[in-house]
Amino acid sequence: QVQLVESGGGLVQAGDSLRLACAASGRNFREARMGWVRQAPGKEREVVACVLSGGSTSYGGLVKGRFTISRDLAKNTVYLQMSSLSSEDTAVYYCAVDFSRRFPVDTPGNYDYWGQGTQVTVSS
C-alpha cells in the first residue's frame, strides 16, 4: 500500500524560506514521477514542481526560480525547498506520485497517489 506522508509546513513570514518533505513507502519509487501539488482556498489544485524518474525536474511558472524539488532515493523522500515566500504561496501542499507515466506532468489528474497534505501559511 502506497503511503505518502508530508511534513514541514507551518506559518512563516513573507520572504522566508521553508522546506517540505514527503516520505514515501509501500512501493519502489525509483521509476515514479513525484510531485508537489498545492491548493489555495477557492482555487484549483496546481502542480508546483515534479521530479521525473530520470531525475529531471519541472516547475510551475509561479514558483520557478523560487522553489526547488529534490529527492533522496535511498530514503524514498522528496523535498520541496521554498524561498522568497509570499502570501500567494499560502495553500495546502500535497505530495503526489505517478507510476503510470502520464503526461502532461503539470496536470494534477495525472498522479495516482496523494498524501494528506501539509498547510503552508505565509503572512505578509
Image (cartoon, grey):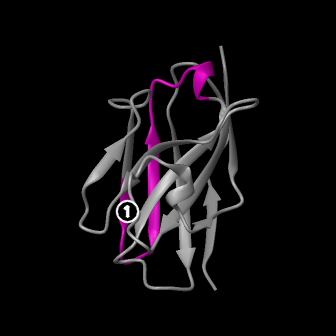
**Left/right of residue 87 with respect to residue 28 in the rendered view:** right
Q: Nearer the viewer, residue 19 or 86?
A: 86
Residue at the extreme top of the image, as rendered: 124
Residue at the extreme right of the image, as rendered: 42
Characterize the local packing of mark 1: few (<14), some (14-19) or many (20 or more) Cα atoms within 10 angstroms. some
Q: Position of residue 50 (x, y in %)?
A: 40, 52
**Left/right of residue 102 with respect to residue 38 in the rendered view:** left
Does the segment drawn in magenta span residue 71? yes
Question: Which quadrant: the C terminus?
Answer: top right
Does the segment drawn in magenta span residue 1? no
**Left/right of residue 117 with respect to residue 25 in the rendered view:** right
What range is drawn magenta here?
70-89
Residue at the image point whose x is 50% and y is 59% from the top? 110
**Left/right of residue 41 with respect to residue 63 in the rendered view:** right
Question: Which quadrant: the N terminus?
Answer: bottom right
Q: Position of residue 46 (x, y in %)?
A: 55, 40
Q: Is residue 8 above or below residue 53?
A: above
Quadrant assignment, res 61: top left
Residue at the image point whose x is 40% and y is 52% from the top? 105
Q: For the residue marked with disc 1, what is the amino acid?
A: Arg
Q: Is residue 24 above or below residue 10?
A: below
Helix, strand or loop status at disc 1: strand
Residue at the image point whose x is 38% and y is 49% from the top? 69
Residue 8 visible in image: no
Residue at the image point whose x is 44% and y is 43% from the top? 81
Q: Which residue is mark 1?
A: 71
Q: Is residue 101 above or below residue 124?
A: below
Q: Nearer the viewer, residue 62 or 17?
A: 62
